[in-house]
Image (cartoon, rainbow, N blue to C red):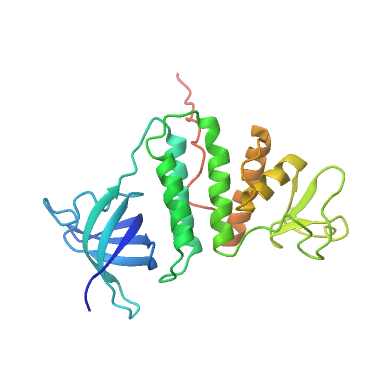
Amino acid sequence: MPAEKTLAIVIRTIPFGETSSVVTLFCREFGKLRALAKGAWRPKSSFDRGLDLLSTSQVLVLRRGSGGLDLLTEAALDSRFRVGTSLAAVLGGLRVAELLDALTAEADPQAELFDVAHATLRRLSNWREDDRLLPAILLRSELAILRLVGHAPEVGRCVECGGPLEAPGRTAFGMLEGGGLCPGCRGGRRAVAWLSAAALAAIRTGVSPAAGTIPLPARAILEARGVITTYITHLLGRPTRVATRPRPPVRRRTS
């Protein structure tokens, strides 16, 4: 079978032996695949810089199609993810890669999902802007990924009865149910978060691809991201491995 060419995002690499690597790629034409790159870390290999994490490369892959690893024969760098001045931007890029790996099945092509992830990584690469802009960018990216993999939260109506969510004060969001709950359906539910009207609007804006950008308070964006992070944790059955905000340094007592 001849090698096939595709544009791919490098979302994970694991050393294999002394010079090789098992690489997880998210390809525009083929979806997620795992491939063995023999001799990837040898000097002057055919993968020169093409397998850097979060970078996008044109790859040649021999697809086995039998449940085993595919074979990667070449990777030519298309765009490298560059670390700028922001650790939060790097963590955001790693978060995108983790969601692509955790929420997709192998060999399931999703070109629009690739485009969303690629655009987000290009935006975060070499980030030198104000870090206060990052939560809104990441919220929209996470919600777009959830929508495209079929797990978008329902925030237009009650996820249980289909009735309106409009109610004074905060709106209940059921983590297990996957969306907003009206006053009549929220009683007795477990794992419920409460969203302010502004945070609910932030999620609604991110879920709808045609909603455009609506200026919202930074506090509402952070609140919405906190709820979506918890929602993703429930989807995966575990916390995400990548935190999206840098941890504060540990203060040690000095004698």
Q: Which quadrant is home to the N terminus? A: bottom left
Figure disc tally: 0
Residue 6 location (% of width, % of height): 31, 63
User: Looking at the rendering, in which quadrant would you find the C terminus?
Assistant: top left
Kindly identify the residue that appears in the image at 56 percent across and 39 percent down: 135
User: At x 40% / y 71%, what residue is drawn?
Assistant: 107
Give the farthest residue toward the left.
44
Query: 248 or 97: nearer the eye?
Result: 97
x, y percent for residue 20 = 20, 60
Q: Horizontal placement of 9 versus 144: left or right?
A: left
Q: Residue furthest bottom?
A: 66
Which residue lies at the image location 36% right of the left edge and 55% below the top edge?
Answer: 9
Q: x, y percentage for residue 182?
A: 83, 56
Asked if 17 appears above or below 124 in the picture, the reply is: below
> Residue 251: x percent and y percent?
49, 26
- In percent of the image, x 16 and y 57: which residue is there? 46
Left or right for 202, reference 39:
right
* Residue in the foreground of this view, choosing between 133 and 184: 133
Whether residue 196 is visible, yes or no, is: no
User: Seen in the image, is 52 located left or right of residue 203?
Assistant: left
Above or below, 208 against 29 in this view is above
Q: Is residue 170 above or below residue 97?
A: above
